[in-house]
Amino acid sequence: MNADQAEIFGSLRGRVKEIMKALETERANLKILQKDYDELKKKSDQKTIECKALEQKYNNLKLAKVMVSETEESHDAKIKVNKIVREIDKCIALLNR
């Protein structure tokens, strides 16, 4: 091996070491980002569940308000209640199959 080849080989070896270090750094960053992503996904899923629960609670409160009031809206409430009862009956029928 002559001097030029040794110099090129040494240069390549140094660059490979730098790339290996950079790769390890990126792997560590990826692990951190994956952990952060998982935590944020978990929080997002929890917030979605909370949002759906609050929407259901809001709809229930609206329905209760309509049922209590003695206006023409009570007819709409009765229709909604009947619709809900039909949906429940369908679910029960599916469970009994």
Image: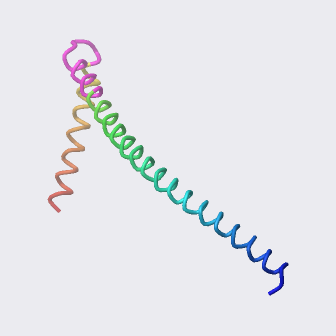
Measuring from the top left, give residue 68's x and y in whole percent: 19, 16
Q: Is residue 27 magenta?
A: no
Relative vertical location of residue 61 with respect to residue 7 in this rendering, above or below: above
Residue at 23% across, 18% down: 65
Residue 7 left/right relative to 15: right
Measuring from the top left, give residue 24's x and y in whole percent: 54, 62
Task: Classify the position of the N terminus by image quarter.
Answer: bottom right
Q: Name the quadrant containing residue 56.
A: top left
Residue at 50% across, 56% down: 28
Dominant secondary structure, magenta: helix
Q: Is residue 71 magenta?
A: yes
Pick the residue in front: 73 or 31. 31
Relative vertical location of residue 24 with respect to residue 51 in this rendering, above or below: below
Task: Classify the position of the C terminus by image quarter.
Answer: bottom left
Residue at 34% across, 34% down: 51
Measuring from the top left, give residue 14's x and y in whole percent: 69, 68
Residue at 28% across, 15% down: 72
| Residues in magenta, as a range | 58-73
